[in-house]
Image: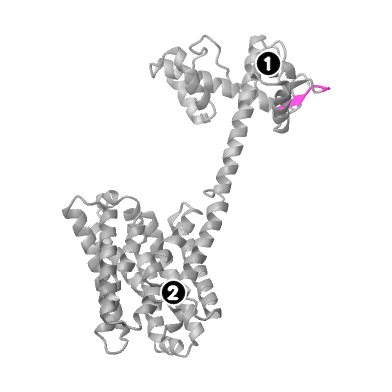
Amino acid sequence: MNELLLATSTMTAAQAALLAALCVGVSCGLLGSYVVVRRVALVGDALSHAVFPGVVAGFMWSEEKNLYLIFGCALVAGLLGVMMVRAIVQTTRVKDDAALGIVLASFFGIGLLWNSTKQQSGVKSFLFGNLSTIDSTDLWLMFAAAVLVTVAILLLLRPFQVLSFDEGFAVGLGYPVKILNFIFFGLLTFSVVVALQAVGVVLVSAMLITPAATAYLLTDRLERMMIYSVIFGCIACTVGWYVSSQRSGLAPGPVISLTGAFVFGLVYFFAPKHGILSKLIRHLRGRQRVLRENILKAIYKQLEVEGFSDSGISIAVLAEVRRCPLEDAMKQAKLLVKSGEATYEEGKSAIYLTPTGWRRAAEIVRNHRLWELYLTNLADYEEDHVHDDAEVIEHLLGAETVRKLERELDFPQLDPHGKPIPVVTRDVQLEGSRTTKQETGYGG
């Protein structure tokens, strides 16, 4: 312990500021994950403002800057703010968000009014954040906060997880929910108070929310989310420390906040699963898949009308059944060929489905007719009201759902309109066609 205190006391101002920023990134990153998952992001904002009267009181009641008194007063003010929010919610019709807004504005207003009566020079560093003013005592408290939060999260990982996703389920499992909530909000208040000198009252909520929200877009696992949140928080704090150290007079709080927002923006657009770009790509691919399946269905139905006398249709016939210009029909045929579901006849005047194309065409028609039968037999729909629903559902039914439908309907052979429901096997055999396992296309 003595060696650690000695090490912190011999650090340069830049080293102390960097380590303090990293400590804030760790503590806020870990707790911020629970804040985001529990959907209590506004609580962090309310806490950051609620502790301000305590900061002012600590400065006014100490002749010199007594950090322990300042943090103690701020901690009491923050916990008092949380208690007032809960009291308002439990004793009135006011909801959580409105109660948080009332407490946030009231406490922050009290702090500003109190400070205006007797200006305290050190209050500004807590209001806007200033890493350059951090001394060994500040650093020690920030380090202690990071260690305390980390140890508490590791010890209470399972109870906090259950509490975050379903408080009622946590009660059913026998967890002391009230005690766990008190511990969580106590840790949150302590972390907010400790982080004030790094990012300030106004922006400390950004350190709680932005890194965690960024991590939330990258994973569905809470453990990974906490790791990513800590990484993003440390990156934002490090960049804020570096930029503010290079530009005199530049407050680190806004830089840290903007860095976190910039990283969030990158992930928001480019996250592999929840990013805007990936969602757009999946949407476009889904539309293209639906288009291909509709083309396959149209070809299958036309061959069915012709009694499966042939295994392909001309581009002109495709244009007719798809009710589109010949040029569009040629593009649709090209789309099937590109996906490996059809091949061209020599001269490209007709297309023939490959085994993959046959199978998918039969699956789509089967899904459509099974769903129509399900709606008429089990959902009491009229026969003339089932087509539009089936047009959508046919593209969404998975193999397991299809098996359940077939069992529910006792493996039917005809749809409500008397048309046969295709039986899809590994090698699709249709009347008038030959079975092959090669992707060359029937009749090609």
Q: What residue type is labelled 2?
A: Cys
Neighbourhood count class around disc 1 (C-alpha, 10 Å): few under 14, some 14–19, many 20 upward: few
SS under mark 1: helix
Mark 2 = which residue? 23
Q: For the residues marked 1 and 2, what is the alpha-carbon distance in whole angstroms?
A: 69 Å
Q: List x then y, in percent, for residue 53.
A: 27, 73
Q: Which of 12 and 7 is in front in this view?
A: 12
Neighbourhood count class around disc 2 (C-alpha, 10 Å): few under 14, some 14–19, many 20 upward: many
Residue occupying image coordinates x 58% and y 35%: 286
Q: Which of 68 and 111 is in front in this view?
A: 111
Q: What residue type is labelled 1?
A: Glu
Q: Give the range drawn in magenta.
A: 342-347
Mark 1 = which residue? 320
Q: In the rendered view, would you say 19 is above or below 9?
A: above
Q: Is residue 361 magenta?
A: no
Q: Does the magenta stretch include residue 344?
A: yes
